[in-house]
Amino acid sequence: MTEAKDLQLIFHILKYCERIKKVITFLDNDFNNYTNKKNFTSLDSCSFSAFQIGELVGKLSEELKNNYSNVPWQKIKGLRNIIVHNYGNIDLKILWKILTKDVEDLNIVCRQILEKNDPNYNIILEEELSEEI
């Protein structure tokens, strides 16, 4: 059984993954829309969500990370450091790949962890996401 603290962290990681997915969908899954200077809020929003994911990953227990060793936890946390300390020099093509592919992979793992431990997590997630602007 996964610890309650880890489940809360995974839930919040999943919320940030879903927020990124919403923005990517809004941008028609198009890199050019993402990098358009007029869409700086989308770039900033996704970067903030990726930063938050990295921050939350850093708080997960070693036990959970070891149980899901197929997830590159250290790289996810490392992305947080890159965003925080080198934001103006981020390679947007690499970040886009992370946002469109790797975040979805993380989303799937988070859902698996939550489903295994709390089959009702999805109801709460949908309620919280529907309240967002």
Image (cartoon, rainbow, N blue to C red):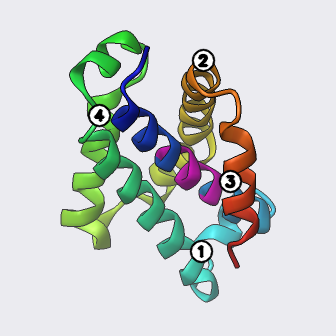
Q: Which numbered disc flags the more N-terminal residue, 2 or 1?
A: 1
User: Residue at label 1?
Assistant: 42
**Do the residues under discs 2 and 4 have CB atoms within 8 angstroms?**
no
- Residue 96, position in %: x, y? 55, 53
Distance between the alpha carbons at the discs numbered 2 and 3? 23 Å
Q: Which numbered disc flags the more N-terminal residue, 2 or 3?
A: 3
- Provide the major secondary structure of the magenta segment: helix
**Was residue 16 drawn as part of the magenta stretch in this picture?**
yes
Q: Amino acid at mark 4?
A: Leu
Nearer to us: label 1 or label 4: 4
| Residue furthest left in the image | 85
Q: Which numbered disc flags the more N-terminal residue, 3 or 4?
A: 3
The secondary structure type at the circle numbered 3 is helix
Please state which of residues 127 and 129 is positioned toward the viewer in this rendering.
127
Q: Amino acid at mark 2?
A: Lys
User: Residue at label 2?
Assistant: 116
Residue drawn at (41%, 15%) of the image: 68
**Do the residues under discs 3 and 4 have CB atoms within 8 angstroms?**
no
In the displayed structure, does residue 72 sit left or right of residue 85? right
Q: Amino acid at mark 3?
A: Lys
Q: Is residue 131 above or below residue 65?
A: below
- Residue 58, position in %: x, y? 24, 41
- Residues shaded magenta: 13-19
Q: Which numbered disc flags the more N-terminal residue, 1 or 4?
A: 1
Distance between the alpha carbons at the discs numbered 1 and 4? 27 Å
Q: Which numbered disc flags the more N-terminal residue, 3 or 1?
A: 3
Q: Amino acid at mark 1?
A: Ser
- Crowding around mark 2 (Cα neighbors within 10 Å: few <14, some 14 to 19, many 20+) is few
- Crowding around mark 3 (Cα neighbors within 10 Å: few <14, some 14 to 19, many 20+) is some
User: Residue at label 3?
Assistant: 21
User: Residue at label 4?
Assistant: 60
- Residue 69, position in %: x, y? 36, 13
